[in-house]
Amino acid sequence: MTTPLQPLLHNELVVLRAPTQVWSADDGSIGAAAIHGIAHSDVRVVRGLRMTVGGQAAEHLVTSGSTADHVTIESLLRHLDDPTPDPGVRLRVDRRVDVDGCSDTLTLSTRHPEAIVTTVAIELDLDATLIDHMKQGIAPAAAVTLELNGDAAQWSGEHVTARLTSESLRISERPGGLLLSAEVVVPARGSVTVGWRLDAHDAIGAVRGARGPVPWSAPDTSSADPRLARWVDRALTDLDALRLTVNGHPDQQFLAAGAPWFFTLFGRDSLWAARMMLPLGTRLAGDTLRVLARLQGTQQVDATAEEPGKIMHELRRQSLVIDDDVTLPPLYYGTVDATALWICLLHDAWRAGLADDEVRELLPALQAALGWMRDHGDADGDGLLEYIDRSGHGLANQGWKDSGDSVQWRDGSLADGPIALCEVQAYAFEAANGAADLLDAFGVEGAAEWRAWASALRERFHAAFWITDPERCGELGPYPAIALDAHKRPVDTVTSNLGHLLGTGLLDAEQSALVAARLASPQLDSGFGLRTMSTDAAGYWPLSYHGGAVWSHDTAIAIAGLVRTGHRDAAASLAEGLLRVAESAGFRMPELHSGDPASSSARPVPYPASCRPQAWSATAAIVVLEALR
């Protein structure tokens, strides 16, 4: 039996506007790769698309597009041409995607003085496969219910209904799907256009596409490095296409985590993305805060990891089955960091100009979130935040590095939970102090209590987390452990988590300098950004998701912290690494890439299952823009 494999993404074309996405080969055809298809709201409705003109496929020339939701595919039709070297018959496909569906417009043109009579035929293979099943490599053809009615075809499955229409192509049924066909006349020295449109609706969708204007302003990049200006421009067009709303609140937008797997609300991802976008205005932050506050936990439910005051992890249309051991409910709270990050975003947005009335409205949620940090986040009362899955079917690791092997000792063995991550303590420290400022500013009691709580956390952190053994520290000196394990032992692997400590106030100047030196070392700085794990760890592998690969958002967080603590040279080096990646990726930054050193390759090796576009990878451009000003 063949083991199911997750689809590779790095060589495929995507056109999208959440919650709709179209994955294809560069020539626009669909079906040759496992990821290919037209999907709406986490259900693939078309799994194959093959097009011929005059009985033959066109010869692809180039695919281009300046926005995430529109590409132009140029091809030749030499079998309809004369034998001279200059191509004289062309096909252009304009593929557009919107929140409701997608369309293809085909334009055939000729330079010749004679008309061309030919046929256009498009075969579509219909589907109703869950995106999650595609990710797991278990996506056999799904049965659909098909109805034909004149110039329209409609089919449904997994609660999604798709409807295809065309004014220029005949629609007929064929085994497994539809045939769109027409005889066309391309006039002498002219062109003819045909096309089709697909609309889809999800009856149980938890999120919807955003239809209003973007909730941010355009930055001034006129004096920036040209590479950075192009990265920012591409990032903002991708972020535009990743905007979503929750049911019942179409005016409040947040950013979907990324394509193709994460077209939904993720507490941590959406919070970090909104925080990184604060230089461009506070509306996205305010909307994100309100959306998450409405879903804030109110009771303790082990099955969903809900607890009073806790900010959720992810929202799905239905339960997510990851494997035999992990099944996540539609509304899942299994994250240790989103609650503190929510508080940090509220504080930062207030400092950036979020209206007092908007902040005041969120003060009850703030107090509930603080209560969670004290009463539930610190489950054993030791003054630190830790996590463990109590349900038996949730995520084993609940920080941003949430893969099963992300918290390991330097010898490669896995740490036992409950786990207290170093960066979570930094978020909590920053959150408590920021919350105290808010409570003072709005005349609410409790500020002194939370400053004292933060001070105690800081003292406990420095007593428990620092690795000082010279044999393990080497020339770079002491460093904070990635985490404490179940026995409160400091897990000694050197990781990029250290970068999240900088600028939060948790470290003093001398400690910040030690961390900055670690981040700038060749063991962590790959030349293409910050490795998630040091090369001197036994578990390091450059294509390990959280054990050696490079994430641009992770690097951007470290860059911002380095700037805030005065280590601008180290920040500039990491920023230059990200700019090299952006340029090599056509300025659409992938979710992550290999940790192989820049000295070994002129361009980064792709992580082949990396999401793109991805929200916090795109917003990293704004962090770098601010850092290099």
Image (cartoon, grey):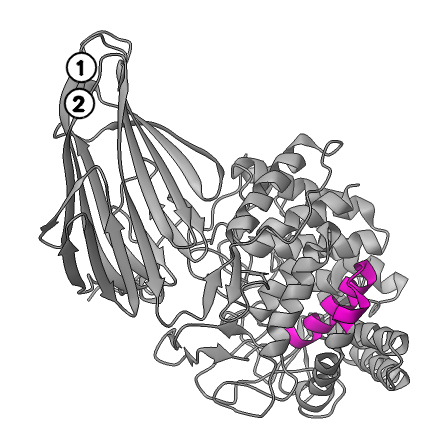
Amino acid type shown at disc 1? Ala
Mark positioned earlier in the residue sequence (2 or 1): 1
- Which secondary structure, mark 2? strand
Q: Is residue 302 above or below residue 550?
A: below
Q: Nearer the viewer, residue 72 or 354?
A: 354
Q: Position of residue 291 (x, y in %)?
A: 60, 71
- Please give the residue where the numbered disc 1 appears in the rendered image: 115
From the image, tell me which residue sits under label 2. 185
Image location (x, y in percent) of residue 52: 18, 33
Q: Which residues are magenta?
A: 337-359
Left or right: where does residue 433 sit relative to residue 177? right
Q: Is residue 11 visible?
A: no
Query: At numbered mark 1, what does the secondary structure look like: helix, strand or loop?
Result: loop
Q: Quadrant of the N terminus?
A: bottom left
What's the residue at 77%, 47% (across, down)? 570
Residues tagged 2 and 1 counted as in contact (Cβ below 8 A) = yes
**Coordinates of residue 413 in the picture (x, y in percent):** 53, 74
Residue type of the residue flagged with mark 2: Val
Residue 466 in the image, given as x and y percentages of width and height:
77, 73
Along the line of sight, the residue nearer the viewer: 205 or 213: 213
Which residue shows up at 36% across the image and 75% down it? Answer: 323
Instruction: Answer yes or no: is residue 81 visible.
Output: yes
